[in-house]
Image: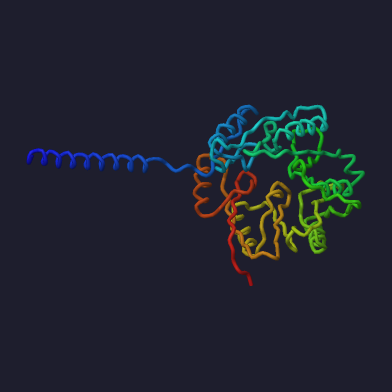
Amino acid sequence: MKGLATDVKRLRRSLVTLGCFVLLQVCSLSSQVAPVPRYRVLKTGKSQKQTVDALNALAGQGYRLILPSFSVQILRLETIPPEIYTYIAVDVDLRSPVDFVNRLNQQGKRGYRWVPELGLGEVMEKKPHPINYEYESPSAQSLNFGGTKLVSSLVSQGYHPLSSLTASFSWQQVIFEREKGAKSKLGRAVDWKKVQIAEGAGGGSWMQQVGALAKSGYRYLCPWTSQKANWLASMMQKCDQDCGGPYEYRYFDLHDIGQFDEKLSAQGREGFRVLPQTLESVFPVLEHDTAKTETYTYHVLPSKDLVALEQELNGKEQEGYEPIGYLSESVLLEKVSQASRQ
C-alpha cells in the first residue's frame, strides 16, 4: 500500500509537470501570433478583375474598402465572417451615361452601391445586410438649363450627389444616389432654393459666397463645376432640423505638403475640420460646426511604400487616428478630441 501511494504521488507530479509544460507551450504560441491588423493596404491590380478579386479576398476576412484610389486601396476590419462585404465590377465602357446609370440601378436593386474612384474600371459594394439603392444622372445640358432647380428637386426627393466623377467617361455627369424607399421630402411645393451654388473668380471671392450662404442657413454639400471659365464653385444645401450648425468655412491650398500636419492641426484646434469630399479640389475646404466643442489633429502619411503605409496606419490607429482621404500621393489621417474652447 505504501508503494502504491508513492506511485500515485509520482503520477500526480508528472501530470502537473505535463500540464505546466502544455500551458507554457500554449502561452508561447499565443505570444507568437501577431494581432489582426485593423487596416490593410492593397495596390490596385493591373486589371479590374485583379482588383476585385483582391478586395473580395480581404472582405472574406471581415475587411471593408474605405478609401479607394487609382493606385492604393485602404480597407478596415469591420465585420466578423460569415457576415462580410462583397464587391463586383461594373462595366463603364458603355455608349452613354444613360446606359451606365441603368447598369447602376440594375445592381442597386440587388443591394450593391457604387464605389467611385478606383481608376481601373468601377466597383460596387454590397453590405452584409443589403440596402437597395437608386441612381439618377441629369445630363449636363439639363443641369445647365435647369440649374439649381433641378438639383433642388432631386435633393428634395432624397438623392445626394456623389462627390467624385469618373475621369474615364467621355461625358461628364454627376451621379445622384439615394436609398430605395427613402422618404421623399418633396411636398406639394418644392423648395427651389434647397440647393444654391457658391462661385467666384478666385479663392477669396468664392469663399465669401460660401460664407454668405452659410450665414443664411446653408451647409457645404460638394464641389461643383462652374459654367464660367476658371471660376471656383461648390454646391450648398439648405439646412433642415437635423443639419446642425451654424457653420463657418475656410479653404487651404495644396502647397508645402510637408507642413500639412502643423497647418491643418492648427485649424483643427479652432474646431475646423477637413471635408474629405473636397480633398481632390483645387482648394480643399475646412468646416466648423459652431455648436460643437470637438477639436481635430491631422497627420500625413506617404503612400508609395505600401508595407510601411500599412504599418503606420495600424500604429496611428492605436493613437486614435483614422484615414479620411488622399492628398496627392499621401494619406490624410484625422484624430477627433473633445475639448472646451474659449
Front in this rendered view, residue 26 or 77: 26
Compared with residue 298, is residue 76 higher up or lower down, i.e. above or below? above
The residue located at (60%, 47%) in the rendering is 331
The residue located at (81%, 29%) in the rendering is 99
**In the drawing, does residue 86 fall left or right of residue 136?**
left
Position in image of residue 210 (x %, y %): 79, 58
Position in image of residue 323 (x %, y %): 59, 48
Position in image of residue 154 (x %, y %): 84, 45
Front in this rendered view, residue 294 or 224: 294
**In the drawing, does residue 77 fall left or right of residue 158?**
left
The residue located at (65%, 63%) in the rendering is 271
**Residue 1 occupies quadrant:** top left
The residue located at (78%, 27%) in the rendering is 94
Q: Residue furthest bottom?
A: 342
Position in image of residue 58 (x %, y %): 55, 35
Quadrant where the image shows the C terminus: bottom right
**Residue 68 occupies quadrant:** top right
